[in-house]
Image (cartoon, helix red, strand yellow):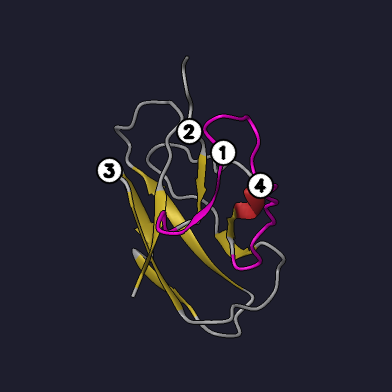
């Protein structure tokens, strides 16, 4: 008999929320809700940049467009792209902040992704 163990952890991967039972296919019911402190970039729209140029101003805001409840420092980088500013801070009480992305003129025409990292 093949057995599959399914476990659900929190975002830190440290706290077990639920898991299935080995001899049955039942799990404790779990519901997920959107976190209000989740960041949304460019209104969840694709960012298009012509190589060798900079994007228009790109907004970062909370998912529900509320004020930020803490100061957050964000760092962004990706090979072939320049971020202005490279490190930026969203201050307590701000609704949003903006940044721009520059695309190197030697980039291939394809879809790229980038990561924003919260730093302390």
Q: CA distance from mark 1 to mark 2?
A: 6 Å
Q: CA distance from mark 4 to mark 2?
A: 13 Å
Dot 4 or dot 3, earlier in sequence: 4
Q: CA distance from mark 4 to mark 3?
A: 44 Å
Q: Residue furthest bottom?
A: 93
Which residue is label 4 attached to?
Answer: 28
The circle on residue 20 is 1
The local crowd at label 4, few if under 14, some if 14 to 19, many if 20 or more residues have their Cα within 10 Å, is few
Front of the two marks 1 and 3: 1
Question: Mostly what secondary structure, the magenta segment?
Answer: loop
Dot 3 or dot 2, earlier in sequence: 2
Which residue is label 3 attached to?
Answer: 79
Dot 1 or dot 3, earlier in sequence: 1
Element class at badge 1: loop
The circle on residue 5 is 2
Q: Position of residue 71 (x, y in %)?
A: 47, 81
Front of the two marks 4 and 3: 4
> Answer yes or no: do the residues labelled 1 and 2 have beta carbons within 8 Å?
yes
The residue under the point 46% across, 30% down is 111
The quadrant the C terminus occupies is bottom left
Dot 1 or dot 2, earlier in sequence: 2
57 w.r.t. 110: above or below: below
Q: CA distance from mark 1 to mark 3?
A: 42 Å
Nearest the viewer among 84 and 63 is 63
Q: CA distance from mark 4 to mark 1?
A: 7 Å
Element class at badge 3: loop
Element class at badge 4: loop
């Amino acid at each position: 008999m093949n057995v599959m163990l399914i476990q659900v952890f929190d975002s830190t991967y440290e706290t077990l929320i639920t898991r299935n039972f080995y001899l049955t296919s039942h799990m404790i019911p779990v519901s997920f809700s959107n976190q209000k402190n989740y960041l949304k970039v460019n209104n969840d729209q694709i960012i298009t940049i012509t190589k060798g140029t900079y994007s228009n101003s790109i907004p970062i805001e909370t998912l529900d467009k509320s004020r930020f409840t803490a100061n957050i420092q964000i760092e962004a980088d990706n090979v072939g792209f320049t971020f202005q500013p490279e490190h930026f801070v969203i201050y307590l009480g701000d609704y949003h902040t903006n940044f721009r992305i520059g695309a190197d003129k030697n980039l291939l025409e394809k879809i790229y992704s980038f990561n924003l990292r919260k730093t302390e």
